[in-house]
Amino acid sequence: MMSRRNDQGDAGIRITVVGSGYVGLVAATCFAELGHSVICVDNNQHRIASLQQGNVPIYEDILPELLRKHVGQRLSFSSDLATAVKASAAIFIAVGTPTAEHGEADLSAVQSVIEEIADSMDGYKIIVEKSTVPVQTSDWIASILLRRGISRTCFDVVSNPEFLREGTAITDFMHPDRIIVGTNSNRAWEIMSAIYAPLAEGYYYAAGSSVPGRCSVDQTPSLIRTSPASSELIKHAANAFLAMKISFINSVANLCEAVGADIQEVALGIGTDRRIGKGFLNAGIGYGGSCFPKDVTAFCSVASQFGVDLDLLVQVRQINSQQRERFITKIRSTLGSLRGKRLGVLGLAFKGGTDDVRESPALSIIASLLQDGCTIVAHDPVAITNTQRVLQHQALAYTDDPYSVANQADAILVLTDWQEFTQLDFVEIKRRLKTPIVFDGRNLLNIDTMSTMGFTYLGVGRPLITCPTPHRLQMHSIAAIAS
Ligand SMILES: NC(=O)c1ccc[n+]([C@@H]2O[C@H](COP(=O)([O-])OP(=O)(O)OC[C@H]3O[C@@H](n4cnc5c(N)ncnc54)[C@H](O)[C@@H]3O)[C@@H](O)[C@H]2O)c1
């Protein structure tokens, strides 16, 4: 069943990945790239049909090339979970685990997949949690299988959390910092070790066609074995820690505004301390996306279930939502009444490099501003279609042309950190604007360039730059925000 050198013509491990979303599709494709035989299953038949026709449902760098390489060879798509289970030694679950009513993770999709798997088991298999789930979910999964009559000797449940970031998902998967495998079973550990051997032993990186990245034959990712409970906690704790870093730097940014310091300089100064690290120290309008908000909430919920108070994370969430409010207040205080005003928005995705708009701060800020009676023209390089599905308003228009958002606008708002926006011709943008004001919610633009060009520039935690003739600006209000 197991092989070490899958590039030598054999089929590797037979894997089913359930879920063809951001994680499932990337994991399935990358497992095929590692030499395994993969069936990716989804109960969304439309999505599966589209994938079978060669369409790529998400925007993700390198994914289209890898799909072209492997579909019809080592990778196939199906909505028949029963057949896929029978054909596989390892079944990875990568379905959604959204927030339920009281903040806990909604595991109903996981449960229905496990029940279907139970009905199709025909021998020993490992069931692998790839979805982010609360601690002790592996025990709960085992209990469902046992209740449905599956013998304890016929399965092991493994926790193998995923740490990929949307926008760099393929590179993250193929060049991970570490691979966590939570299992108490040596048999399951052997299968998981074989699945990840091309990365952990480094021979994947020796191939000329390997996805480029930070790992190499000499610098391989570590494969870390833990208990299932530790592994489940690692994923929640990692996301909570990163969210905490963001809320921390945002709090310091607010202090910077009050005292006239620059958060970019402060972040550089503290981030170069190796104990702290530079990552996740970008002040702005806060975190969003499908993971941090729900995972921090679920982590708090599971902790309180076990009688442990994670008050720190309650603060992290509060700071995060206040950060959006603060940004909106800054716009209102600067422009005065927004009724009849026109705003141009650059960025809809929850971060640059993805078309994912789930929990995007940009969308909630736009929705809030629309209530004030302004009109908004918004641009995003790839996330317009996804936004249109969830945000429609008669005063909101979308455009594929980033420059059009500036036409006769009272200000520009930068809401997503797309690097493309730094390359825009701001002379042209200024020419189109009614008043040259930029609210940079991501601290993306160069403050000196903006100043030299004569913009009024309001970042987050950065000095306020005012253009020589501050058209109708209410400077006293800006001072009020800072204090
Ligand atoms: N998106 C990320 O960046 C990321 C990173 C790490 C971990 N995660 C975790 O991975 C999990 C999946 O996240 P995602 O962003 O890929 O979600 P997603 O919503 O993009 O995809 C989930 C997929 O599962 C399918 N599905 C749901 N129920 C099913 C069922 N019963 N049978 C078969 N298919 C079913 C859906 O149709 C959908 O295509 C979540 O737990 C998430 O927290 C996400």
Image (spheres, grey):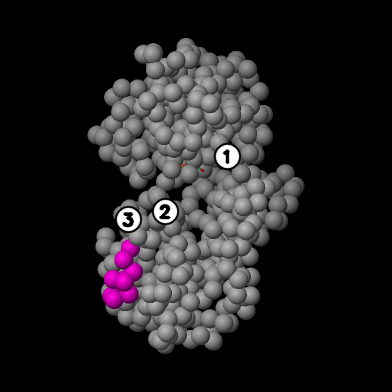
Task: Give the mark nearest the N terminus, 3 or 1.
Answer: 1
Residue located at (48% from left, 52% from top)? 289
Residue pictured at 30% horizontal, 64% vertical: 402
Q: Indicate the position of residue 194 as horizontal and vertical percent values.
A: 52, 19
Confirm whether the magenta stretch covers residue 426: yes
Name the kind of residue labelled 3 in the image: Pro
Q: Does ligand 1 reach within 8 Å of label 1's beta carbon?
A: yes
Of tags 2 and 1, the one toward the viewer is 2
Residue identified by numbered label 2: 352
Side of 329 where 396 appears, left or right: left
Q: What residue is pinned by disc 1?
A: 133
Give the vertical position of 374 relative to 127 (above or below): below
The residue mark sitting in front, 3 or 1, is 3
The rendered magenta stretch, by its main secondary structure, is classed as helix
Along the line of sight, the residue nearer the viewer: 402 or 309: 402
- Pointer 3: what residue? 381
Amino acid carrying label 2: it is Gly
